[in-house]
Image (tube, grey):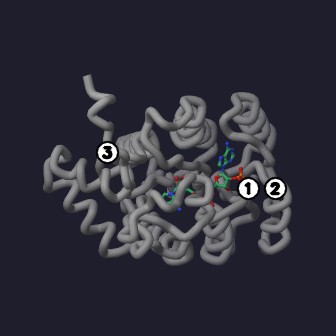
């Protein structure tokens, strides 16, 4: 039976960096299953990784994809030592001004796919294995101008912390990774990057140290991993200050558009 890691969102950014660092950090792994839609990029990653890599080119928002993965797990019966759920995206803009389809897609990939994949992988996870879920510092407070995205990440944080508690008796450890802005293609897909404030741009981290810290925190059995002093400060502030007072500040960070008086009743 093979010891493997499963990484979603491996075709880009943080997920790809997880795949690279996991093979360096855990050389005893026999292989890795990498998942994403961009097949060419998955092939490129496969070529650079010094372990047996299986590519799953699929859209994780489709039920069929989850079914295919579940069937493959049943067939291969691997030991999943590390699961990283990194696939996800966010769309900037006021809720009413963005498409409903896009909002639903955010929920489908950030919440539904992550939940289904965790469920599908758990029966194959022995004691001492780890689950790393990509949350975000957006999980700490509601974010006007990024409302649905922040809500999806609040779900990931809440789900992961409860799951961490449930799985403790099985000696399986869950870490929710909650960085601030990271320099990946995320903001290209997020839409108008002009909407991101200068403060956010200044706080931008590189994926390498974010992933390094996440793997270290997972090895230390921490249930939340927050990279950087500014994000640790943000988390503390979100715990200490009533969200009612933080909402206008968050709105300014994402340049939320005010309703005009004509739009008010
Ligand atoms: N970058 C940041 O500032 C930041 C901060 C905090 C948290 N995060 C979170 O970190 C995670 C990774 O983001 P990133 O920064 O690495 O962004 P990224 O470079 O855009 O990567 C996103 C990854 O998700 C995959 N993906 C998206 N939709 C998918 C779908 N329907 N089916 C399968 N795969 C899908 C993409 O693969 P394909 O394109 O091949 O489909 C890609 O590999 C996300 O969950 C994001 O919310 C990012």
Residue 246 x/y as whole percent: 21, 52
The residue indicated by pointer 3 is 142
Q: How far separated are the C-alphas under marks 1 and 2?
A: 6 Å
Q: CA distance from mark 2 to mark 3?
A: 38 Å
Of 78 and 162, nearer the camera is 162
Q: Is residue 77 visible?
A: yes
Residue 43: which disc? Answer: none
- Quadrant in the picture for the C terminus: top left
**Residue 190 point in image, percent of width and height:** 56, 53
Q: Is residue 24 left or right of residue 69?
A: left
Relative height, residue 94 to residue 254 (above, below): above
Q: Nearer the viewer, mark 1 or mark 3?
A: 3
Q: Residue at x 27, y 34 (%)?
A: 261
What SS does tag 3 mark?
loop
Q: Which residue is mark 2?
A: 54
- What residue is pinned by disc 1? 34
Where residue 141 appears, as percent x and y from the top left, is 29, 49
Give the quarter the ligand 1 occupies. Answer: bottom right
Q: Of label 1 and label 2, which has the lower sequence position?
A: 1
Whether residue 123 appears in this view of the structure is: no
Would you say the residues marked 1 and 2 are in contact, meaning their CB atoms lie under 8 Å apart? yes
């Amino acid at each position: 039976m093979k010891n493997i890691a499963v990484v979603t969102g491996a075709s880009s950014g943080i997920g790809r960096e997880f795949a690279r660092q996991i093979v360096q950090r855990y050389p005893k792994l026999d292989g890795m299953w990498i998942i994403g839609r961009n097949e060419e990029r998955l092939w490129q990653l496969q070529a650079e990784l010094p372990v047996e890599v299986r590519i799953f080119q699929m859209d994780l928002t489709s039920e069929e994809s989850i079914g295919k993965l579940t069937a493959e797990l049943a067939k291969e019966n691997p030991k999943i030592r590390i699961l990283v759920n990194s696939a996800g995206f966010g769309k900037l803009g006021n809720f009413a001004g963005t498409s409903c389809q896009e909002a639903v897609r955010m929920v489908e990939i950030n919440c539904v796919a992550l939940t289904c994949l965790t469920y599908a992988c758990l029966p194959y996870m022995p004691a001492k294995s780890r689950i790393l879920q990509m949350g975000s510092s957006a999980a700490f407070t509601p974010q006007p101008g990024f409302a649905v995205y922040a809500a999806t990440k609040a779900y990931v944080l809440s789900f992961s912390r409860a799951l961490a508690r449930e799985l403790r008796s099985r000696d399986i450890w869950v870490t929710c990774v909650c960085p601030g802005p990271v320099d990946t293609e995320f903001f290209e897909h997020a839409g108008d990057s002009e909407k991101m404030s200068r403060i956010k741009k200044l706080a931008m981290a590189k994926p390498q140290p974010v992933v390094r810290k996440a793997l270290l925190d997972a090895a230390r059995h921490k249930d939340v991993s927050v990279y950087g002093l500014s994000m640790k400060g943000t988390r503390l502030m979100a715990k200490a200050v009533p969200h009612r007072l933080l909402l206008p500040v968050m709105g300014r960070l994402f340049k939320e558009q005010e309703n005009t008086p004509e739009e008010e009743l």
